[in-house]
Amino acid sequence: MTKPYSLDLRERVAARVASGESVRAAAATFSVSVATVVRWSQRFRASGSAARGKMGGHVKPRLASERAWLIDRLARGPEATLRGLVAELAERGVVVSYGTVWNFVHRERLSFKKKRVAVRTGSPRRRASPRTLEKISGQN
């Protein structure tokens, strides 16, 4: 995310516009866009300051109200998938995306990784040499 312009610059631009200079002239003088000067001037007229507004912030998770149900559901059956949870939540009247459920699972440190059934294949140097076809079929 980009950083906001300094308050000093904002106030100087807004003061120029308030003193009667045109928005385009002020934008050219301070090398900012015309739209930026308009927004700063409007903010200055409305509040008396050209200070930036709030940036970012914390957003309450959408599944906070369903936390207990989701944790209980995941404890009951390990076969649950994220897409299945999205469908079950929709049946409960909570319409969320796959990403929202994934973020919940990640935030709660719940894992959906599959268990390893077999060892992955390694490099050919590490495994035993294959038997020849004649020994397998019983022919010499």
Image (cartoon, helix red, strand yellow):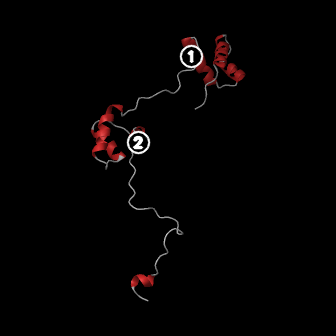
Front one among 4 and 105: 105
Identify the disc placed on residue 28.
Answer: none
- 22 relative to 93, above or below: above
Query: Judging from the image, what secondary structure is the residue with disc 1 in?
Result: helix
Front one among 139 and 62: 139
Residue at the image point whose x is 29% and y is 39% from the top:
72
**Which residue is tagged 1?**
43
Query: Judging from the image, what secondary structure is the residue with disc 2 in?
Result: helix
Location of the N terminus (image quadrant)? top right
Marks 1 and 2: CB-CB under 8 Å? no
Point out the residue furthest to the right here: 29
Residue at the image point whose x is 67% and y is 25% from the top:
32
The answer to whether residue 122 is left or right of residue 50 is left
The percent coordinates of residue 36 (x first, y second) are 61, 23
Quick one: label 1 or label 2, which is nearer the N terminus? 1
Point out the residue furthest to the bottom here: 140
Viewer-nearest of discs 1 and 2:
2
- 21 relative to 55, above or below: above
Count every numbered label the image shows and give the total: 2
**Which residue is tagged 2?**
102
Residue at the image point whose x is 50% and y is 64% from the top:
122
The percent coordinates of residue 2 (x first, y second) are 60, 30
Location of the C terminus (image quadrant)? bottom left
The Cα–Cα distance between marks 1 and 2, rounded to whole angstroms, is 39 Å
Residue type beneath disc 1: Arg
Front one among 121 and 29: 121
Residue type beneath disc 2: Trp
The percent coordinates of residue 39 (x first, y second) are 58, 20
